[in-house]
Amino acid sequence: EQDRVVKHPLRSLLPYWKEVLLGTFAMGITYSLFYVLGTWSLSYAVKVMKPPFSQNEYLAMQMVSVVFFAIFIFVTCIYSDKLGRKTVLISTTLATLAFSLFAMQSLQHNVLTVMLFLCVGFALMGGLFGPCGAYLPELFPTHVRYSGAGLSYNLAAILGGAFAPAISTALVKSTGAVESVGWYLAVMSLLALIALFLIKESKDEDYEK
């Protein structure tokens, strides 16, 4: 009735390009972590680790550990309502940074250490993923909210996830150290933290524009 439909969503987003970029980098570690855990670590455990796991063995461990992903989506959504999305995301990203620096040493042919690696990693992934559905839209005023959140979310998937398995494989091949994948995740965590601290959330008056 008010003819408030945005005719050119991307053009209307141009004044908010900083929010799009910051939202992209803030969520990039979410996808880096997911594809390192879900794709790269499977390939590493089956093809590189000595002795290797069978594919069925490692997939079974991933199926168990991904339950922690689901649980922590639920947990951090609750706490993001109580404490604030940004607070929860910064805390979880800091925990992900610590995980990145120390967890890769767990990738040995030992079911207990690998399960710990996967369960903690997927729990952190859930902690990052849970609040983003509310956090990203809150960065934009209503007339570009869906477009802004959608573009940031999908650019984060490309920046953080699309290249993560290839980057991780190349790092291990070039350095000979599985810890290099942790350094990569640490860099992505630091970029996310910088973006989170730089983000200025929309004020109430912005929603009326």
Image (cartoon, rainbow, N blue to C red):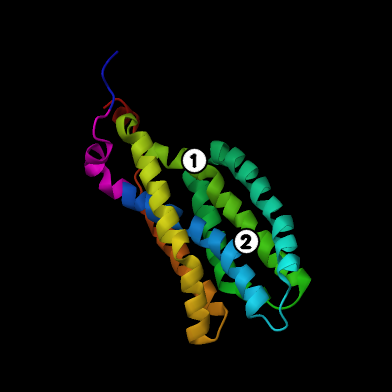
In the image shown, does 96 or 152 lie closer to the viewer?
152
The residue at 48%/38% (across/down) is 134
Q: Residue at x 34, y 38 (%)?
A: 147
Q: Is residue 66 above or below residue 206?
A: below
In whole angstroms, how far apart are the C-alphas of marks 1 and 2? 20 Å
Q: Residue at x 40, y 62 (%)?
A: 191
Q: List the residue tagged with mark 1.
A: 133
One can see residue 81 in this view: yes
Give x and y (percent) for residue 168: 50, 73
Res 179 label: none
* Residue 199 horizontal/vertical position (percent): 36, 48
- Relative side of 54 to 130, left or right: right
| Residue highlighted by disc 2 | 121
Q: Which residues are magenta?
A: 6-19
Looking at the image, residue 85 lies above or below residue 155 = above
Does the magenta run of residues contain 14? yes
